[in-house]
Image (tube, rainbow, N blue to C red):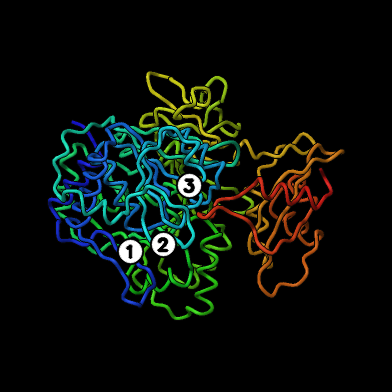
């Protein structure tokens, strides 16, 4: 009894072949949507998979997806899974040196890329010795280098729409590259069966995991349609791809956009009757609020049941603003990582003064990072998860040894998040250990201070970093983006506001106001940028 993602997807296709599976919305209301049923998406993935196999890409070899959101992205992932080729996400913001590192570190044998990235791919290609097959999606920009790449449409046309790929395994790999906040990107190696249970909730996020592979399709056949999932962050960050597969496991519909544009997101929610939106924290939720208060005022949001965030939290203040505009929506702060899948969700009382509090699943514990023993209530430790966890980091034995361990006959992953746990089992996440600021011997976690800052009525977004300080070792610096129309914000006003939410040693000693907070395309914090901005403003070399 094995759980393989391609086998599971095909089992769903066979029971709901004519149900709509995927909708790509270019510009809402223009009629430019591309719609595929489950059988059409299955056939499209088969075509590309056969092309890859016929081009000499073998089971176990790695293929990079250097793509914006689109049908091609999910079609390529499915094609890889069907042919037992390992899909590897590529951050489309990477420039030449970063691409060379990732292409080589991941041992890519093939690459599917958007034509817009032709110049960057051409620059990196001469320094990648294993990358031998290219498939290009879209139209090549004028003046771009000439690459020996197969147009995506031709690759599709040359492949058979039938299956016929032979047996697959629960051990087939799925690699998710994660950049994190420090260091070079690392490839998290998941067995597909482990990813199915840890990252895809075993086929049922709302109930019990399936007990046998056949049960997934049986549940889909017995249920109905009508749920539309809308993952709005880039598919290349992993969470959106997993959200899409959660929808496929339900036999439901996925809607995607090429890029995140708040007004178009809202129009698509109305047009496609979206049920569930996933995004990343305040950086993606706040612009929706602005649009609902402005050009999209009156948008019909009645179909929307839930908005969930993963990778960054939706602050209490921003959640309240959105809830006032869309009263019946359920707002969920989920917690997880590329290394663990899902760990749990935030409690209703999470927020400034109480911290980011989690109801975790039974596989998640707070442990001493040296002994791996569970910590006592109230004592700080590291979050860890057992059972269905990755095999390790690709091509990095050292990081694997530092992050994964065996205990009690089970494999565990030690996450980078510091936390405490109370007597009731509620976990309070303190923040990333790598971002912890040591100020006068006290530990300050940026996320807690950011929550306090973002509850200020004039603050639109904020990041917190540590800056070297002769007296304190490091001082807490706040880098903030003000709301439109806000007046001057002083350090004294920020300190007075934060003093009502956090202890004195956590209060910012420096304030830097910037036009825009820099984040990743998915809304994740760029702490290296924040630290550099704060240090420059403070005159630190």
- Categorize mark 3 by other alpha carbons within 10 Å: few (<14), some (14-19), many (20+): some
Closer-to-camera residue (461/358)? 461
Residue 182, located in which quarter of the rendered image? top right
Q: Residue at x 73, y 51 (%)?
A: 533
Q: Which mark is residue 339?
A: none
Query: Do the numbered discs 1 and 3 sit on residues whose CB atoms are within 8 Å?
Result: no
Residue 138 position within the rendered picture, expressed as x and y whole percent measured from the top left: 37, 59
Marks 1 and 2 sit apart, C-alpha to C-alpha, by: 8 Å
Query: Do the numbered discs 1 and 2 sit on residues whose CB atoms are within 8 Å?
Result: yes
Q: Secondary structure at mark 3?
A: helix
Q: Which mark is residue 24?
A: 1
Residue 522 position within the rendered picture, expressed as x and y whole percent measured from the top left: 50, 54
- Mark sitting earlier along the chain (1/3): 1
Q: Which mark is residue 122?
A: 3
| Placement of the C terminus among the 4 image quadrants | top right
Closer-to-camera residue (183/199)? 183
Figure check: 83 above or below 136: above
| Placement of the N terminus among the 4 image quadrants | top left
Q: Residue at x 56, y 25 (%)?
A: 369
For residue 30, side relative to residue 490 (left or right): left
Residue 265, located in which quarter of the rendered image? bottom left
Q: Secondary structure at mark 2?
A: loop
């Amino acid at each position: 009894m094995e759980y393989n993602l391609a086998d599971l997807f095909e089992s769903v296709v066979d029971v709901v072949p004519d149900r709509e599976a995927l909708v790509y919305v270019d510009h809402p209301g223009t009629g430019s949507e591309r719609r595929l049923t489950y059988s059409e998406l299955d056939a499209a993935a088969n075509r590309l998979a056969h092309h890859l196999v016929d081009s000499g890409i073998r089971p176990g070899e790695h293929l990079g997806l250097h793509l914006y959101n689109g049908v091609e992205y999910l079609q390529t992932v499915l094609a890889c899974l069907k042919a037992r080729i390992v899909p590897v996400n590529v951050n489309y913001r990477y420039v030449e040196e970063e691409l060379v590192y990732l292409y080589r570190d991941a041992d890519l044998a093939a690459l599917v890329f958007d034509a817009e990235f032709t110049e960057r791919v051409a620059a990196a290609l001469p320094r990648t010795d294993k990358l031998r097959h290219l498939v290009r999606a879209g139209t090549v920009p004028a003046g771009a280098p000439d690459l020996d790449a197969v147009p995506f449409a031709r690759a599709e046309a040359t492949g058979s729409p039938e299956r016929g790929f032979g047996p697959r395994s629960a051990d087939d790999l799925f690699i998710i590259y994660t950049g994190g906040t420090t260091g070079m990107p690392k490839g998290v190696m998941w067995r597909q069966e482990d990813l199915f249970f840890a990252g895809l909730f075993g086929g049922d996020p709302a109930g019990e995991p399936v007990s046998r592979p056949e049960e997934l399709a049986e549940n889909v056949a017995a249920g109905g349609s009508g749920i539309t999932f809308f993952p709005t962050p880039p598919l290349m960050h992993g969470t959106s791809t997993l959200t899409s597969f959660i929808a496929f496991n339900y036999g439901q519909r996925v809607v995607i956009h090429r890029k995140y544009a708040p007004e178009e997101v809202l129009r698509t929610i109305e047009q496609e009757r979206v049920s569930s939106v996933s995004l990343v924290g305040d950086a993606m939720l706040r612009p929706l609020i602005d649009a609902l208060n402005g050009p999209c005022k009156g948008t019909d949001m009645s179909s929307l049941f839930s908005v969930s965030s993963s990778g960054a939290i939706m602050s209490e203040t921003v959640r309240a603003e959105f809830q006032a505009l869309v009263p019946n929506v359920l707002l969920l702060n989920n917690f997880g990582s590329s290394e663990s899948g899902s760990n749990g969700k935030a409690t209703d009382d999470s927020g400034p003064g109480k911290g980011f509090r989690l109801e975790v699943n039974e596989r998640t514990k707070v442990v001493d990072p040296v002994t791996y023993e569970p910590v006592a209530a109230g004592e700080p430790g590291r979050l860890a998860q057992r059972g269905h966890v990755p095999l390790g980091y690709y091509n990095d034995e050292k990081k694997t040894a530092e992050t994964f361990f065996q205990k009690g006959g089970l494999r565990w992953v030690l996450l980078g998040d510091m936390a405490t746990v109370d007597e009731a089992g509620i976990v309070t996440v303190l923040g990333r250990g790598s971002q912890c600021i040591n100020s006068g011997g006290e530990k300050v976690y940026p996320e807690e201070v950011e929550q306090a800052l973002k509850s200020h009525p004039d603050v639109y977004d904020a990041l917190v970093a540590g800056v070297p300080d002769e007296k304190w070792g490091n001082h807490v610096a706040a880098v903030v983006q003000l709301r439109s129309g806000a007046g001057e914000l002083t350090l004294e006003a920020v300190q007075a506001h934060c003093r009502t939410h956090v202890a004195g040693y956590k209060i910012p000693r420096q304030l830097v106001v910037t036009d825009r907070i820099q984040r990743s395309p998915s809304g994740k914090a760029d702490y290296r940028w924040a630290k550099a901005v704060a240090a420059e403003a403070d005159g630190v070399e």
